[in-house]
Amino acid sequence: MKDEQAPQTPQNSERVTVLGGGSFGLAMASILGKKKYPVKILVRTQDAMDSINIHHRSSTYLKDVTLPDSVTATCDKEEALKDATLIIHAVPVQYSRKFLKEMAPYVPKDCPVICTSKGIETGTLCLMQDILREELGDSRDYAFLSGPSFAREIAVGLATAVVVASQSDTLTNRAAEIFGCENFRVFTSKDVIGVEIGGAVKNVIAIAAGMCEGLGLGTNAVAGLVTRGCLEMQTLARAVGASPSTLMGLSGVGDTFGTCFGPLSRNRNLGIRLGQGEKLEDILSSSTEVAEGYATALSLVEFLLTKMPRSFRMDLKFPILFGVAEVLKGERSPREGMKDLMLMPIR
Ligand SMILES: NC(=O)c1ccc[n+]([C@@H]2O[C@H](COP(=O)([O-])OP(=O)(O)OC[C@H]3O[C@@H](n4cnc5c(N)ncnc54)[C@H](O)[C@@H]3O)[C@@H](O)[C@H]2O)c1
Ligand SMILES: O=P(O)(O)OC[C@H](O)CO
C-alpha cells in the first residue's frame, strides 16, 4: 500500500500520543502506525498495556485487529506524554474532565491536541472545546475530528472521510497531512462549534432511529425521523453560531446518516434494544462500549431549556431531542414517544 511509505521530514519527527485505548483510540493509532509514525497509547491497566506491547492487539476493544509495530502502549502518564509532539484525545466525554485534570501536569507546553470525542458533558453542559481549554489551558491549539467514522472500519482499512475543525489552519493542515492516506481523507474547517454540535447531536438522533427500528416501524418512519432530526440539529447549530453548511457536511448529516443507518453504531443499537422493550439499566450494564448519546440527550435538553433564547416552546421546536430524553428518563415508552411525534400540533 502507498501509505506504508515512511513520511518525509519534518513529519517523521512527529511523536503521537493517543489518550484512550478504546475502539477509537486504537483506530487512530492504527492509521498513524501504518504510516510509520511512532504512536504511544495511554491505557489504564497493565493487562491492556501488555496485550498491545506483546500481542499488538487490545484484549478488550477491536480484539481481532492487529496494530502496526510502531504502536506501543503504556500505563504511565509521564512516559506517555513526555516527548509528545501531537496528542489525540479519545476518551469518552463524560470521563474527559477528570481524566484531563490528571493529565495536565504531564502535557508538554504548547503541544496541540486533536479531539475525537463527541458529546456534551452532563452538569456543566460543556462541549469538548470548553473542557479541553478549562483543563489544559488556552495557549495550545485544539482541533476537533468528526464525521462518519466507525472505529472498526477505519482499523481494518476501509475508506473513511472526516473533517477536522480548528481556529488554527496550521493544525488542520498538519492533521490532514499526518492522517491522510488512500483510506483516510481529511477535510478541514474553521467551524469548531458546528463540527462539535453535529457530532454530539447525531448520537441522540441515532438513538431515536434505533428506537424506530426496534419498534419495527419500517423505512418510511426511520427516514422521516432522521430527516426531521437533522432539521433540529441545524436549528440548534444555527442558534449557537455554527454555519448551516457545516451541518450539511460530514460532521452533520454525514455522521447522522452513518450512525442512524449503520449496523456498527452503539447509539443506534441502544435505541433498537429500547424499542424492542429492554430496560435501559439492563442495556447499559450489558454494554462494554460507551454510547455517548445517552448522557448527551439529557444534557441537550437542559442546554435547550437554559441556554437558548426562550422565544418559543423548546419541546415543540425540538420534539425528537426532547422525546429521546423523555424515553431515557423513563417518562414515556418508545411507542408513546413515536405516537406523540405523529400527533404533534400542526404549527
Ligand atoms: N468507536 C467509534 O466508532 C467512534 C467513532 C468516532 C468517534 N468516537 C468517539 O470517541 C470517543 C471514545 O469512544 P470509543 O469508541 O473509543 O469508546 P470505547 O467505549 O471503545 O472505549 C472507552 C474508553 O474509555 C476509557 N474509559 C472508561 N472509563 C474511563 C474513565 N472513568 N476514565 C477514563 N477513561 C475511561 C476506556 O479505557 C476506553 O479507552 C467517544 O466520544 C466517541 O463518541 C468513537
Ligand atoms: O457507535 P457510535 O454510535 O458511538 O458512533 C460512532 C461514530 O461516532 C460514528 O461516526
Image (tube, grey):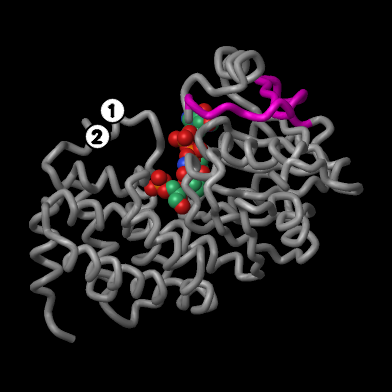
Q: Who's the residue at 25% across and 57% down the image?
A: 209
Residue 68's place in the image compared with 301, above or below, is: above
Answer yes or no: disc 2 within 8 Å of ligand 2: no
Residue 19 found in image quarter: top right
Residue lying farthest to the right in this orientation = 9
- Residue 104 in the image, given as x and y percentages of width and height: 71, 36
Is 75 magenta? The answer is: yes
For label 1, the residue is 286
x and y, in percent, of residue 142 in the image: 70, 55
One can see residue 93 in this view: no
Near mark 2 (Cα within 10 A), the count class, few <14, some 14-19 or many ≥20, is some
Magenta-drawn segment: 63-81
Against 245, residue 118 (above or below) is: above
Comparing 155 with 166, the one in front is: 155
Q: Look at 27% across and 43% down and name the residue there.
A: 270
Task: Give yes or no for residue 5 being in the magenta stretch.
Answer: no
Q: What residue appears at the point 79 percent right and 54 percent down from the top-left corner?
A: 139
The disc at residue 266 is none
Residue at 83% x, 46% y is 7
Question: Disc count in the image?
Answer: 2
Q: Is residue 13 visible?
A: yes
> For this rendering, which residue is in front, 233 or 296?
233
Q: Of the residues shown, which amino acid type is indicated by label 2?
A: Ile
Amino acid type, residue under disc 1 in the picture: Ser
Quarter of the rendering occupied by the N terminus: top right
